[in-house]
Structures are given as structure tokens and as C-alpha cells.
Amino acid sequence: MKFGLFLFFLSFCFNVNAQTIDSIALNNLRDAVLELENSELMRSGSLSVSVKKVKDATNVFALNTERSLPSASTLKLVSTATALAVFGGDFKFQTFLEHDGVIRNDTLVGNLYIHGTGDPSLGSDRFKGYPTGIELINRWTAAVKKKGIRYVKGKVIADASFFDTETIASTWIWGDIGNYYGAGVSGLNFNENLYKIKFKPGADFGDPTTFLGIEPAIPYLTFTNQVTTGERGSGDQTIVYSSPLGNAAVLTGTIPTGSAVFSVKGSIPNPAEYVAFALKTSLMNGAVGIGESTVPQPGMPIASANPKTVLDQYDSPPLRDLCQQTNFWSINLYADALFKQAGKRLAGKSAFDESAKAITAYWSGKNADLRGFYIKDGSGLSPSGSITTHSLTDILNVVNRDASFNDFYKSIAVLGLNGTVRNLGKGTKAAGNMHVKSGSIEGTRAYAGYVTSKSGSLLSFSIIAHKYMPGSNRVITDSLVRIMTLMAEL
């Protein structure tokens, strides 16, 4: 009698729907989840797993699905899904080179403007057939010279006012924002808002390193180098400390011994300022005289008494391509730019808090259950933002009914084949079958996406392991991948 009640209790707790689902496979999945939950790895942490049928949103398996936990980068699925649903896969960001003056002989009497609309890919080298940062600056220089302009009696003004003044979320960690993955979001982004820092390591462990400079060169940035030499093979253990819109950075941590030059990536604190500087430098090198460059604060309106004339219009790759790069390679800048873009379209405001409210209302309005959905950004970088696995699988199910689903589904990397999950699950039935977004912040590992079950049903899933045993990243990843591969057996 007690054993029968126990089985009923398990069935109730896990909300198992066994119709058309292999019962043996379901038991195997349950056993793997319980084994991890009851292990020493999760003694002080939380494990949440939600698996649903996409067709009718019924639960296949559920454990702790209403606990609100950090999403890490699985939140990028929500940002990209929202952008594709709101704008469509063909949408392109536009960036304009303009002037507001008159051309008299070879002189432009007026200002040059670089007017951004939040394109996170501007100047990126990720997209074949689209100009890199250097190529774009050269293109704009050529556009000015094509008009016969040899002197600008005015300024180069970087117009980043499309978005608000808040370039980073207030809940991001200071140790993140100076590094490339913590780059702020501007109305005028460039080169993915990153630069490479080059070091020469010392000969022995603990030796000071030599700061060799950055690429691209940004002479107005200053650096205090406190980086020392670590053990051979220890990798990049640096932290770049800087502030939004500031021009000073402190470099700490270690780089490994054994290489002549070792590079790490930092975030450009004010990308609009850099674009204005780069264009002014290129114009002057191309024999075009010009006054000073001016960079208004992000989000501040640009005043001009005269109408503007477009010298060049640059269109980004289609949104579907940006979303694919976002989800394949977990690019925080792209996710947060799409998050702000959607917020501005849905609510007329692009601040992080306002965008979060707008996006939450959008999916709630489509009947997704968003209790416990407390997001702070679009990338999942904020450790204080949280979601439930139940709410994420609800959103994934709703997306399936949207016209944008095909683009969204293709934007998610395939386990064992590509993106950040290319080396996971190889040789299993999940490899090549599971579209999955990975996520990782300190103390949290997460995965979410879709898998086609053995019975032919498309399933949505979300897994979050939070506050697992420190130092067990590899073990927890292997455990979660094992759980995901068992989903493909259902």
C-alpha cells in the first residue's frame, strides 16, 4: 500500500504525461534527474527541469519548475524570439552618414553625423559580404570625398541617441562590464564594442607582464597593468575593470606563460566616441581637414537647425542572421541590443527595466505563464535576474505558433554539431536532433530549447542547475548533457 502511494506521489510531483512517451525512457530520465538532485553536487543548490509537448503544452516531466532561478544565457532565446516575432526575420538595422550643412566649393560648412539605430553588428567581421570596421570607416571616408569635400568646417558627431542613456544594466557585476562579454549597448555600436589587449608574459610564474597595447588603437584610453604571469596552459584569467563611458581601465589577473604574445578582449566603454574618432582620423589621413569630433552622451537628442542630407546608408544583415549568431555563440551585446530594440518598439522606451516590462507583457499577453519571470536584461548576464523553467518552456511553446518560428528554430545551435554546444552529446540520439541554447554564469548552468522525441513529438525543455558545488563545472555539465540526451529517447 505504501509503495503504491509512493508511486502515485512521484507521478503527481513530476506531472508526468506518459501518452505516446516511452515509459522506460521516461523512467530513465526521471532516475537521472533524481540522481543529480540528490547528489553531493546539488546538496546546497537547486535543480529545475521542465519538459513539455509543444503541440498541446502538456507536461512530460517537471521538477521544481516554479522555482525562480537565474537563467544565464538561455534568456537569449526570449530576446531573439521577441525580436523575430515583433520585427520579422527580414528586418535590418540602418546606420546613416549625414551632414547638416552646405557644400561650397570643396568645403562642407556644417557637421558630419554618424547616426546609429542600435545595430549591434556594425563593423563586425562575423558576416561574409558585409564590411568590417576598417572597411566601413574607409567607405564613409570615400563617401565624403566623393562629394568633393576636402575640408569640413564643423565637427564629426556620433549620434547614439536612438537608445536611452543606460548602456549597461544596473545589476551587472563590475568585474564583467570591462570585459568583452560585458560590453554596454549603445545606439551606435561598433566592432562589437570590443578591443584586443596584447600582453607579453613573463618567463616564470608570478612575473609581471608587459602591456603591448590594444587593437584597434584607441589613444585616449589609458590602462593600469597589474596582470601577472600564470602557469602554462592556465588560459585567460584576466579581469578588465572600467566604467561606462569612462576612458581608464585597470587590468588584473593572470595570463599563461609560454607564448610570445597573449591577447585578451576588453569592452570599448563608449563605442560612439570611438566611431567619431576613427572617422575623423581616417578623413584627416585622407587629406580631408576637419575640426574636433564631438560625442554627445548616449540617449541625448542631437540638435541641428538644418535638415540632414544622407551621404551613405548601411543596412545590417537580416535579423534572422543576427539572431543565429546571438544564439549560436551567445553574444551578450547582440541579445541586449535586440532586447532594447524590442522594448522601444513595444513600449516606446529602451531602458533595461522598461524593456523587461514590455517583453514580459508581450509574452504574458500571448498566454505564457510568467509567474516568477523577473528578468533584468536580454542576455542573462545579470545574476539577479531570474525565470522559471516552466515560464521558459511556455514561451518556447507559444513561439511555435508564431510565423517567425522557422527563423527562430534555425537560430538555435544543434547539439553535437555547431555553436557553443558543438562538442556536447556526440554519438547520442540527441546529437543532430536537439536545438539547444547553453547558459553559464557563476554558480549556474542552464540549457533550453527543443528536441524531437523518439515518438515523433516536438518537445520544449529547460534545465537550470543553480548553486551547485564550486569547482564542479565539468561534472555538472556532463550530468546535464546526460539528462538532455535521455530526452531524445522519450
Image (cartoon, helix red, strand yellow):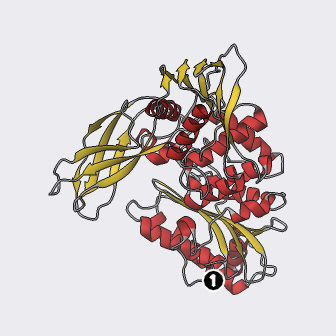
How many marks can you see?
1
Determine whether, in the image, residue 199 is placed left or right of residue 340: left
Residue at the image point whose x is 53% and y is 65% from the top:
420
Q: In which quarter of the image is residue 77?
A: bottom right
- Other residues around mark 1 within 10 Å, as few (<14) / some (14–19) / many (≥20): some
User: Is residue 128 among the parts visible in the rendering?
Assistant: yes
Expressed as whole percent of the image width and height from the top left, the position of residue 276 reads: 51, 30
In-image side of 399 versus 136 (left or right):
right
Left or right: 425 as drawn, with respect to 199: right
- According to the picture, the residue beneath numbered tag 1 turns out to be 429
Figure check: 281 above or below 338? above
* Residue 170 image offset from top left, x and y in percent: 53, 34
If the image is split into quadrants, where does the N terminus sit? bottom right
Closest to the observer: 282 or 228? 282
Residue at position x 64%, y 51% from top? 387
At horizontal 84% and vertical 68% (from top left) the residue drawn is 55
Residue 103, horizontal then vertical, whole percent: 64, 20
Q: Which residue is drawn at 67% across and 59% down?
A: 65
Q: Which of 207 and 442 is in front in this view?
A: 207
Residue situated furthest front in the rendering: 105
Q: Label 1 is placed on what type of residue?
A: Lys
